[in-house]
Image: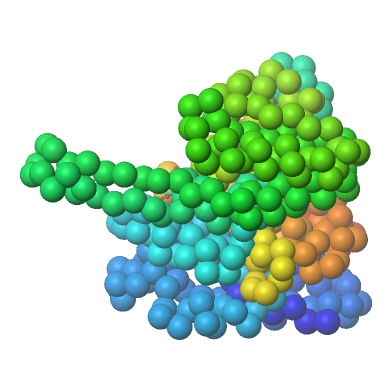
Amino acid sequence: RTFRIAAIPADGVGTEVVAAGRAVLDALAENSDGAFAFDWEEFPWGCDYYGKTGKMIDDDGLERLKEFDAIYFGAVGWPTVPDHISLWGLRLKICQNFDQWANIRPVHFLPGVQSPLRKADHTELDWVVVRENSEGEYAGLGGRNLSGRGPGGEVAIQSALFTEVGCERVMRFAFDLARTRDRRKVSSVTKSNAQQYGMVLWDEVFKRVAQDYPDVETESVLVDAMSAKFVLRPEDLSVVVASNLNADILSDLGSALAGSLGLAASANLNPERRYPSMFEPVHGSAPDIAGQGLANPIGAVGSAALMLEHFGLPEQAARLNRAIEATTAAGVLTRDVGGTATTEDVTKALIGHLTN
Ligand code: NAI
Ligand code: MG
């Protein structure tokens, strides 16, 4: 079958890693004896587009995206546009309108990649961070200038939204995921000692949902303690479920502990499949290295593997992940993971490991 994919490379290294991911996926399809194919359409949305048109995405953009099987996204954000405008205008707009309420971010060691934890002799790191992706601290609730006072007296409020339905669905997702893994454990993260409404609701829902999964080990950990645990006891974690902000921060920490932000993959899922899901590397547009062929494409290619799983092609996803491991094991590494290879070198090596 042919899968229709909307590519949105957007800004900076987003364009480089999406091109790499597309090349790898096309090579995979070409070597599938016609079992499946990808039909791509690329959209020019992002900060350049905003500079030209005043819009991060066309007015009918969401309507057009709706008919695709998936969205393959690069990264949004560039110094010419305030980050809250570019992020809300494109990425968060897609996530929220398409109800992509589960964001999964796997973290694991790759062969041949050094990391701070490996240096500290931790041999095992294999987690999935499950991020609540529709509400919490990124619900967009609040306002500016609430005091009505002039300069120097402004008051702003940023509220977090927690609903029982929103908490419960992402927790069930995390528990179901834990059941597919060797280590059946879910760690829930909050700051419910300091945030006494939403986060306490989260904790209560977690306890209730856990009762339906007696075969899964659980723990509730405060986010500050969890950030220490990520570093000190990585082998003690399997699935980590957290609110939008906490999981956002923890997953960047996790990917750095595994070696680099450039390695980290993610999927923004609409589990009901009413709308397309979106697959993207965890990292941003990396203006400091953009346009120089230095971007690590592995986060984007790992996200493509998550897309293949979503398409019901788990053996193809595994093939792609094996190509990633063979590439890093062979020492074909970009600068962020201590090598000298370019984005293109890594892409070629990945394709080589797929086709032979
Ligand atoms: P960033 O993730 O773009 O960069 C952080 C550091 O990681 C930089 O040193 C960068 O060079 C490095 N890095 C990132 N991706 C890499 C890759 N593929 N290979 C090698 N090194 C890589 O985060 P930063 O600098 O905070 O944000 C830059 C822009 O990206 C901002 O406009 C921000 O709003 C946006 N952003 C967008 C995201 C998205 O679209 N999902 C996520 C995070 C940030
Ligand atoms: Mg982030």
- Residue 196 vs residue 256, the one in the foreground: 196
From the viewer's perspective, tell me whether residue 56 is left or right of residue 115: left
Residue drawn at (10%, 44%) of the image: 149
Measured from the top left, where is residue 155 in percent x and y? 22, 41
**In what quadrant of the picture does the C terminus appear?**
bottom right
Image height of 353 relative to 233, above or below? below
Along the line of sight, the residue nearer the viewer: 280 or 225: 225
Protein image colouring: rainbow
Camera-nearest residue between 263 and 153? 153
User: How many tags in the picture?
Assistant: 0
Identify the residue shown where x is 86% and y is 57%: 319
Residue at the (86%, 71%) spot, across then down = 31
Q: Is residue 76 above or below residue 70?
A: above
Q: Residue at x 52, y 41 (%)?
A: 198
Q: Position of residue 134 (x, y in %)?
A: 55, 56
Res 15 visible: no
| Residue 325 against residue 235 in the figure, above or below | below
**Residue 123 seen in this snapshot:** yes
Quarter containing the N terminus: bottom right
User: Where 155 falls versus 173 (above or below)?
Assistant: above
Relative to the observer, which residue lies in front, 112 or 278?
A: 278
| Outermost residue toward the left in this view | 150
**98 on left or right of 302:** left
The image shows residue 22 at horizontal and vertical percentages of: 67, 67
Q: Quadrant of residue 101?
A: bottom right
**Residue 151 pos. (x, y %):** 9, 42
Residue 88: quarter of image: bottom left
